[in-house]
Amino acid sequence: MDAKELIARRVAQEIPAGAIVNLGIGLPSMVANYLPVDLGVFFQAENGVIGLGARPPEGMEDINLTDAGGGFVSAVPGAAAIDSAMSFGLIRGRHLDITVLGGMQVDARGRLANWMVPGQMVAGMGGAMDLVVGAKQVIVAMAHANKGVSKIVPDCTLPITAPRRVSLIVTELAVIRPEDDGLHLIETAPGVTVDDVRAATEADLIVTGDVPEMRM
Amino acid sequence: MDAKELIARRVAQEIPAGAIVNLGIGLPSMVANYLPVDLGVFFQAENGVIGLGARPPEGMEDINLTDAGGGFVSAVPGAAAIDSAMSFGLIRGRHLDITVLGGMQVDARGRLANWMVPGQMVAGMGGAMDLVVGAKQVIVAMAHANKGVSKIVPDCTLPITAPRRVSLIVTELAVIRPEDDGLHLIETAPGVTVDDVRAATEADLIVTGDVPEMRM
Amino acid sequence: MKQAISLEDAIALIPDGASVMVGGFMGVGAPRRLIRALAAAGRKNLTLITNDTAIPGEGPGPLISGGCVARLITSHIGKNPEAQAQMLSGQIEVELVPQGTLVERIRAAGVGLGGVLTQTGLGTLVEDGKQVVKIDGQRWLLETPIQADFALIRARRCDYVGNLEYTLTAHNFNPIMAMAGATVIAEPDEIVPLGVIPPDAVKTPGLLVDHVLRRAC
Amino acid sequence: MKQAISLEDAIALIPDGASVMVGGFMGVGAPRRLIRALAAAGRKNLTLITNDTAIPGEGPGPLISGGCVARLITSHIGKNPEAQAQMLSGQIEVELVPQGTLVERIRAAGVGLGGVLTQTGLGTLVEDGKQVVKIDGQRWLLETPIQADFALIRARRCDYVGNLEYTLTAHNFNPIMAMAGATVIAEPDEIVPLGVIPPDAVKTPGLLVDHVLRRAC
């Protein structure tokens, strides 16, 4: 199992039956592949569809039905098409259960940075700031490090997306839960030790008792 | 012609082709009866219809299609049904050309009072405050006096609906236009003299040259 | 997916003292079954948020007549002498709100905004006691969000996800209130199978709706 | 009633230096014909307000590629290297706005509100230089309304009153921008006779639309 699949599978375990879930572009969007179809989860894409389904077979795409990345999708029975005011009204009004987002950094206070690198990469925040402020739960799904440099840091050096503490961080090495007192290491990936995670993590990690391995 | 019909007919002359017009309950709603059907005017009712038409024949009413007073109406071809957020978004966002409202008082600064009599009649403002603030033109259609007491006063003694100066006042005696320097008497009703109007009006009226008679 | 619930079970959710939003305009588009059952159940001390009190017997009228309401936030009580009398006698505390401000305050609560900045009400009694915000030298009245424990929503059709459709002048406050109730109960004329309501026709996405009232018969 | 106008006549309405809102999300639901003709006409110094700059060639991409834009208000330029390069070189002045804030700022202009009070952006770079309003002890970021000289709106269907229908994820910013342009030009896929679009299906009432673009062929 590669790193991305591991992360996506582990995030999928966090999603309860019937949840309304926004999945970011890229890795987070893979989470949908690992959910039981009978779980009754509805996926929201901020470009305006609730009840996003799989990419349709070749030749059956509709140019007016895509996800937030512009990729073709389908709509499940019971789907709703909405405009951006309603879409972000749902997000900002706390009507969305979970958002799964990628990250560039998360710090010891659980703050996410994922929208710009000053002077270099300026993508824009898109819907990320609204999602982090508004979703009931924010799960960050990302690689633990970027070119060997830890993305879990004492204090974000990149501009943060919101001061809110995210709910959970899932990487290919660990599951980490930010709390009042810092980052709690709550699971390690199969075959990864606590020391491995500490070595790969620039921020301090709080370890209480035995840390279980992810059950995949 | 009775007083109400006279007022409604005169107000109708103010409405240009293609205008979007809100008519208040009561006297103002009579204005629709005196417009040429080919004028292309669309009537908006704040309860959520643009393209309001006449009351349908007995037995063809729809309980879900009424005007703001709860009376049955029809919808013309090209009508739109909207919710209250859009309805008042149109009103407050200055997308409505004209509103015709009843009044309890209008004063020398052109301020309308039409929503409460402290300690006695407390109806509530409904949509009146929004309409007076938001419509491009506000026409007050009302009787000149109430039980012999002038409704056109130096300074409103009733709580005002908005500090905005209304565009025009039409009564069974006169047409009056509020301006920076006060209330200009611009027309008198057929058979009514300037002195008659002055005698019936508590506020000062400005008269410049000959005052024409309404052309009915 | 939602199981439709009985009128009895729906009413049992709403305790004395609750704040309740009720859709409708002069009774059109009002959730009649829920209103009548709530009044019949003898609820007391409710905060009622509704565009208008219609005429006695219509719209939220039965809640007024039944003495269920202690506090009323509305734009118009002029057609309901009982509401006027209860206000003048002090039985109901009434907050009169301009209609456009009322709908935006409800929307603000539903979409997570801190308030509404409006010209409506400035320079009138409505301004009294409220914060005024200066933006580029212009004064704007700050009106605060209104949310409620319950929103009772009348809809034309509903599916088992809870997606709602409305019709003609029965839209009014319903789609907006459906965003601002902590618990939203929909009273549709008809419940249809999944997929019957096209995605583009949905005006209230089902995720906003907590309970769907079973059909009358 | 509105006569449909030609692409040429529509473009002639929009001068150099105008502010222009353009619907669409990653190009989906963008008014392609108007955008391409505007770029082909060589307009300069435009202020472009749009959710994102898509990829070059898509959505508002041709306006970026054509050097038509001096100022850009948007939430995302990450998929358009030309937009990024023109920002870094200083050719385009870019204001990045959180997407939910962007749509509410446009709506605020359209419905006559003084601004938007939001939590989004508080405690981030987005807060810099902006007014913060305290309400009951809580801080809210005040974001100002955004209006434009023109709004270019893509719609699924339109009638000769100008009523607009949208479909699926091609809604996005279109219905909101249609409220906030001083002049609104609709680019429908199809124009249908009066009465074909049912009142309940209208999402932009025709009174908001100034011009309807004639069909392509």
Image (tube, coloured by chain):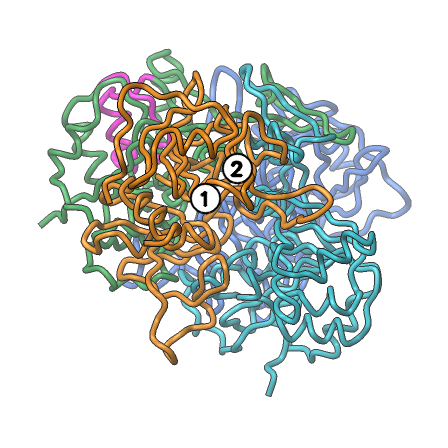
Chain colours: A blue, B orange, C cyan, D green
Q: Position of residue C48 (x, y in %)?
A: 72, 57
Asked if labels 2 and 1 touch by Cβ distance under 8 angstroms, the answer is: yes
Counting other residues with Cα less than 10 Å from the Cα at mark 1, is it few (<14), some (14-19), or many (20 or more)?
A: many
Tell me if residue C152 is in the magenta stretch. no
Dividing the picture into quadrants, the one containing residue D61 is top left
Report helix, strand or loop for mark 2.
loop
Give the residue type that dot 1 points to: Met
Q: Name the residue under label 2.
A: B151
Name the spot of residue C115 as percent of width and height, x first: 64, 36
Q: Earlier in the sequence, mark 1 or mark 2?
A: 1
Q: Say which residue appears at 57% left-offset and 60% top-offset.
A: A34
* Circle 2 chain: B
Left or right, D42 with respect to D128, comes to left
- Residue found at x 28% / y 53%: B34
Of D130 and B160, the residue lying toward us: B160
> Which residue is nearer to you in this view: B77 or A183?
B77
- In the rendered image, residue A129, in percent from the top left (x then y), is placed at 58, 34
Question: In the rendered structure, which segment of residues is drawn in magenta?
Answer: D44-70
